[in-house]
Amino acid sequence: MQKIWLSSPHMGGTEIDYIQEAFNSNWVAPLGPNVNGFESDLESYLGAPQQVAALSSGTAALHLGLILLGIQPGDFVICQSMTFSASANPIAYLGATPVFIDSESTTWNLCPVALEASIVDLTSKGTKPKAIIAVHLYGMPFQADEILAISEKYNIPVLEDSAEALGSIYKGKKCGTLGTIGILSFNGNKIITTSGGGALTTSNPALKEKAVFLATQARDAAPHYQHSEIGYNYRMSNICAGIGRGQMEVLDAHIALRRKAHQFYMDFFKDMADVEILHEPTADFYSNHWLSAIVLSSYEQREALRIAFETVNIETRPLWKPMHLQPVFENCPYYGEKVAEELFQKGLCLPSGSNLSDEDFERITNVLVTFFKK
Ligand SMILES: *Cc1c(COP(=O)(O)O)cnc(C)c1O
């Protein structure tokens, strides 16, 4: 039986044409026309005045984002606890301290109440946080009105981790354009892929320019190699960007297919009170439904379902393990209750790719029907 993946790369077909063009013109070296083309494709997709810098990964984009926000060794940076470790690692790269915040139970993202409590408490101790990393998990927009209001009230910028949310929308605004700086990921399992890559987005042209400068070894304007700042090798290659240009042509079609997969699970679980499925709470939220995720009634039931899928070669995965429970971050401050922890105990991501076939859905249905005796 062929493996059904949680989320696997899905090429549209024209990616190879952009790569061929790069070979034909010998733009195999980094940078080149595909990088500029991919950036302008993303800029039109996100809408004016957003500016995009194509980078080697989403993690690199987060690292540069924190540098652009002026994060220094010893600073405190707030980060949603339930997320992929790449949201938090760049805080540690800079010698700053991550402060982890619980989720709220509607979007599973940053809890505004715990966020504000942490800011008040840290400020009273003389360690006012310097940035807030908020994540749109599984493509679901975070409670942006509440979080941006807190950001404004305390004058702390939001670094918007939109790695999983390209194409998601909050109140008419595309995710990736809500914070002072946003980041995207084009890793192999994301909604579109460049085989590996990411981007930094901002409406501030000076910040984009600085991001590109830092990402290309911080070279000063001189005929020789001259440097006044520490630089990084974080730019996207012209080959990877070619894949990205082809993927942009099918992005909306692939979002429609992910949303269809999500509707399939919504229909299956609709009258099952003991299974919760992550869904758009109101018309203000539009998710690309990168991954469809459910919460079962116990850890044991979650594991039993995961293993039932695994037995027939279908990949599923527990939700992200919160960062405050990770051994590497065990000494970092945490604010909140046990929302993220419980989601981690009982939650499971289901196959959600845009390339699932009717036969794949049949195999998935069979497992669910047998398991829930429906
Ligand atoms: C994938 C991901 C990243 C990192 O992106 P890479 O391109 O893999 O470096 C960061 N944050 C979240 C939430 C992600 O899912």
Image (cartoon, rainbow, N blue to C red):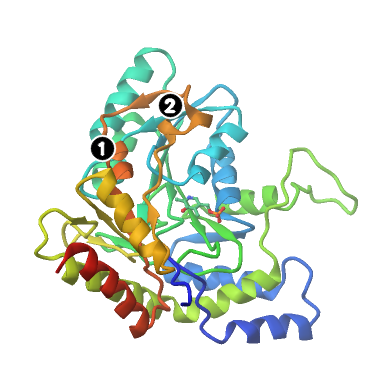
Residue in the picture at 37% in, 79% down = 360
Crowdedness of circle 2 by 10 Å Cα count: few (<14), some, many (20+)? many
Q: Is residue 304 above or below residue 102?
A: below
Give residue 141's position: percent from left, percent from top.
31, 55
Q: Say whether residue 116 is left or right of residue 19.
A: left
CB of residue at label 2: within 8 Å of ligand 1?
no
From the viewer's side, name the closer residue of 60 and 174.
60
37 left or right of 116? Answer: right
Above/below status of 229 relative to 181: above
Q: Amino acid at mark 1?
A: Val
Q: Position of residue 33 (x, y in %)?
A: 68, 75
Quarter of the picture containing the C terminus is bottom left
Percent across and percent down for residue 137 are 36, 52
Q: Is residue 260 visible?
A: yes
What amino acid type is highlighted by mark number 2?
Answer: Pro
Name the residue tied to disc 1: 339
Q: Position of residue 93 (x, y in %)?
A: 62, 35
Give the label on residue 45, or none.
none
Classify 113 as above or below 345: above
Frontmost residue, 102 versus 268? 268
In this view of the protein, can residue 139 be seen by the observer?
no
Q: Quadrant of residue 82?
A: top left
* Label 1 CB-ligand 1 distance < 8 A: no
Mark nearer the N terminus (2 vs 1):
2
Circle 2 is placed at which residue position? Answer: 129
Element carrying mark 1: helix
Q: Is residue 60 left or right of residue 316?
A: right
Q: In front here: 40 or 12?
A: 12
Image: 110 above or below 206: above
